[in-house]
Every structure is written in C-alpha cells, then in structure tokens.
C-alpha cells in the first residue's frame, strides 16, 4: 500500500491535489476548544478548508469528521456551507472521560482567603489525595474536601461541567451526479458499506464485547428470510451497523437497558393473500423470526487508544506524543464504512496517523496532511509498521 504524508498547512497542501482524486475522507480536525492551550485548536476548520476537501473528493464521496460536543454545530455548519450534504451524526461513547469542572465551593473558599484542605482531598479510607477528585475504596464515589466558609457550604457539590462521555462524528457526502446507482457505477462512490461493517454474530470476541445476549444460539437464530435484512433482528452476516459506537467499558454498558429485539409470530391462514410477493397454496403462514436479547449496547465496539495502540511500531526512542489519538480499531471501521474497494483515503488533519494506519491495514492507499513535522515523523513510523511499503514525506 502507498501513503503520501504532506507537511504543512492543509489548506495550502490540498490545493496541490487534483480534482476528484480521493474516494473518502476520514479525519479528526481541531475542535476549537483551545485544548491544552494549543494554538492549532483555537477554532474549527473554516468552510474554505472544506471546499478544498470537497473539490478533491469524487462525486458522491463520503466524509466522516469528529468534533467536540460543544463545537459540533460550528464544524458541521462550515462543512455544509462548503457544499456537503449532511447525511447523519454518529456518536462514539466512552467511559474514560474526566470531568474538567471547577469546584464552586472550593473557589468561594479560595476567594475568601480560607485555605483549609486546598489541593488535598480526603478519601473515604482516610488517605489524602492530590487530584481534584479522588476515587473512594469502591472507585465509583468521590469525596471532596469539606467547605469552610458558610457561603462555600451553601454551594457545596456544585460545579461547572459534566463528565465527557461521547464525541459526535458527522457523516457528510459530496453531492451525487444523477442517482445513487448511476453515481456508484460511474465513480465508485455514493454508498456506504453496510455488510462490511456489520457487528458479526458469529465472532466470539465481538459477541462478548457487544453484550449480545442469546444472539447466535442454534435454537434462537433468525430463520432464513428476506425479512432479515435491516429488521434489527439477528442476521447471518451480523447486526446492521448503527450510528452509535462505544468503547465497551462497564460504565457505558451499564447505561444501556436490557432489551429484546422483535419477534414475528405465525399469522393465521388466509387463502389467496400475498406475502412479500409470494402466494402459498391453500393459505399462508408468515416466516417466524427470532430476535435477540441482552444489553442495548449491541453496537460496534471500539476502545479508546491505549499506550500499545498509540506506540505500536515506533522506535524505542520515539513516543506518540499527540494529545488526541483515536483508536485504530475505530478508524478502521470508519474507513471501511465509506471507502470503496481500491479507494484512496484522505485525512487533512492527520495528527499521528491513526487514519492512515487504519487505511493501510485494510488495503487502501492514503494521503495525510499535518502542520507539525514531529507528528508527521510519528505517523511515518506507524504507517511503515502497518505495511506501508511506499511511504513518502513531502514538505511544503
């Protein structure tokens, strides 16, 4: 597989690419949150950037782009203003987010000059922790230092932010030329790979991770039927991919209720009536279909990027220092969802190369752009390890 890594401002580097030269775009752009005080995250990308992305996409080509929950609207409006059609919003749920919240009572005490346990929070086991919130013995409850002043006691337990537990992902498409069928035949783009991204019922690991209850048991499989496609019950190829993804953590799984998919019972005999275009001599009985049961978290599983995921393939003296690395498994699913066979994948905000690694692992060529030469070097090492025999770095 081939990969081109372009160093420099993405708006300038994209102008070097030919019209309609890439098949899909999978990217994690700046969220405009001022993340860790970084200058590159001062704003979401402008419509000018997305117009260049639109230009290099084939007609009907899809794009998926992550955004923060607070600035998603600004990012998506810019994408729509550039000429994209907004097709859907995906949600990636995870359990490892940390609440970046101000303790209001502590702030009131500090403003009043009352120091007390400043910087030290008492744990339930009697120990002292230095983090803003320290878990108690059962790791799920948190104990704050006691408020000192009367005003602080009034506002004890109040904060300024919720715990982050999801990131929205926009699914957008360049306008088609003609119908979907005509566009697919002419350009190979315009559709998404449903069957290639199903949650497989016959995969033991996927079965367990998706808490799929009794799906796949021999006595509870849905019988062969045209009704199977997309009905939400078990299917020989797996569950229809949803627009919700999760990291499989206990915290996420516990938030989903136990559910059962629908089951169709045989209907009464009704001579001469048509069933899905077929008549049964002497009456008919509809096909009985079986659903499945278990946690409603029967969606796609993708953990957050751990140290092994971030640093796999890097030399011993190199570490992936990018602050917002996405897991390769998640990016592989997104790449596969929107990229046609043999398609070229673009990431105009490449970072440390998770999209590129995902593309190469699944047999796609890749073009990535990043402003920071250090991140480009990390991406190069990761992509070579992923089978990128031809990895070229081009500086501005």
Image: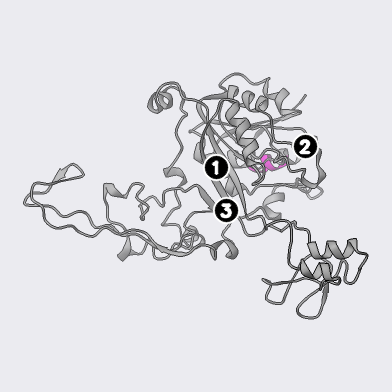
Identify which residue, 186 or 255, lies in the foreground: 255
* Sooner in the amino-acid sequence: mark 1 or mark 3: 3
| Element type where label 2 sits in the image | helix
Classify 177 as above or below 276: above
Which residue corresponds to mark 3?
302
Identify which residue, 175 or 157, lies in the foreground: 157
The span from disc 3 to disc 2 (Cα, nearest Å) is 27 Å
> Residue 25: x and y, percent?
58, 33
The span shown in magenta is 381-386
Residue 274 relative to residue 67: left or right: left
Quarter holding the C terminus is top right
Classify 304 as above or below 38: below
* Sooner in the amino-acid sequence: mark 1 or mark 2: 2
Residue 247 relative to residue 260: left or right: right
Quarter holding the N terminus is top right
> Residue 308: x and y, percent?
69, 54
10 Å neighbourhood of mark 2: few (<14), some, or many (≥20)? some
Which residue sits furthest right? 113
Which residue corresponds to mark 2?
40
Quadrant for residue 215, please give it. bottom left
Helix, strand or loop for the magenta stretch, by majority: helix
The span from disc 1 to disc 2 (Cα, nearest Å) is 24 Å
Query: Measuring 27% from the left and 46% from the top, which residue is drawn there?
Result: 226
Answer whether residue 151 is visible to the viewer in this image: yes
* Sooner in the amino-acid sequence: mark 3 or mark 2: 2
Residue 304 relative to residue 153: left or right: left
Which residue corresponds to mark 1?
334
Classify 73 as above or below 204: above
């Amino acid at each position: 597989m081939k990969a081109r890594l372009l160093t420099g401002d993405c708006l300038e580097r994209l102008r070097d690419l030919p019209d309609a030269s890439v098949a899909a775009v999978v990217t994690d752009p700046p969220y405009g949150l001022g993340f860790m005080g970084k200058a590159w995250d001062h704003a979401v990308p402008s419509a000018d950037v997305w117009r260049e992305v639109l230009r290099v996409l084939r007609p009907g080509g899809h794009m998926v782009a992550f955004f923060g929950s607070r600035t998603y609207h600004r990012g998506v409006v810019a994408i729509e203003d550039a000429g994209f059609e907004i097709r859907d919003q995906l949600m990636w749920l995870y359990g490892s987010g940390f609440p970046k919240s101000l303790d209001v009572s502590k702030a009131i005490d500090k403003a009043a000059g009352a120091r007390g346990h400043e910087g030290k929070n008492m744990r339930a086991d009697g120990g002292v922790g230095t983090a803003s919130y320290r878990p108690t013995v059962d790791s799920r409850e948190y104990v704050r230092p006691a408020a000192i002043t009367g005003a602080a006691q009034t506002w004890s337990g109040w904060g300024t932010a919720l715990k982050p537990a999801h990131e929205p992902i926009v699914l957008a498409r360049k306008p088609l030329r003609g119908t979907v069928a005509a566009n697919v035949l002419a350009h190979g783009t315009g559709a998404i790979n449903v069957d290639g991204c199903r949650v497989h019922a016959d995969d033991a690991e996927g079965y367990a991770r998706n808490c799929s209850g009794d799906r796949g048991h021999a006595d509870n499989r849905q019988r062969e039927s045209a009704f199977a496609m997309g009905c939400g019950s078990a299917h020989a190829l797996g569950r229809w991919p949803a627009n919700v993804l999760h990291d499989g953590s206990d915290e996420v799984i516990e938030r989903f209720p136990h559910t059962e998919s629908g089951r169709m019972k045989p209907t009464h005999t009704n001579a001469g009536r048509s069933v899905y275009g077929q008549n049964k001599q002497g009456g008919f009985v509809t096909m009985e279909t079986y659903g499945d049961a278990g946690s409603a978290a029967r969606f796609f599983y993708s953990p957050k990027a751990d140290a092994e995921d971030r640093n796999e393939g890097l030399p011993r003296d190199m570490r992936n220092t990018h602050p917002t690395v996405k897991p390769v498994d998640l990016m592989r699913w997104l790449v596969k969802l929107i990229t046609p066979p043999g398609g070229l994948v673009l990431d105009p905000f490449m970072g440390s190369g998770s999209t590129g690694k995902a593309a190469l692992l699944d047999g796609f060529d890749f073009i990535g752009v990043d402003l920071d030469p250090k991140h480009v070097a990390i991406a190069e090492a990761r992509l070579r390890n992923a089978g990128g025999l031809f990895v070229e770095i081009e500086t501005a």
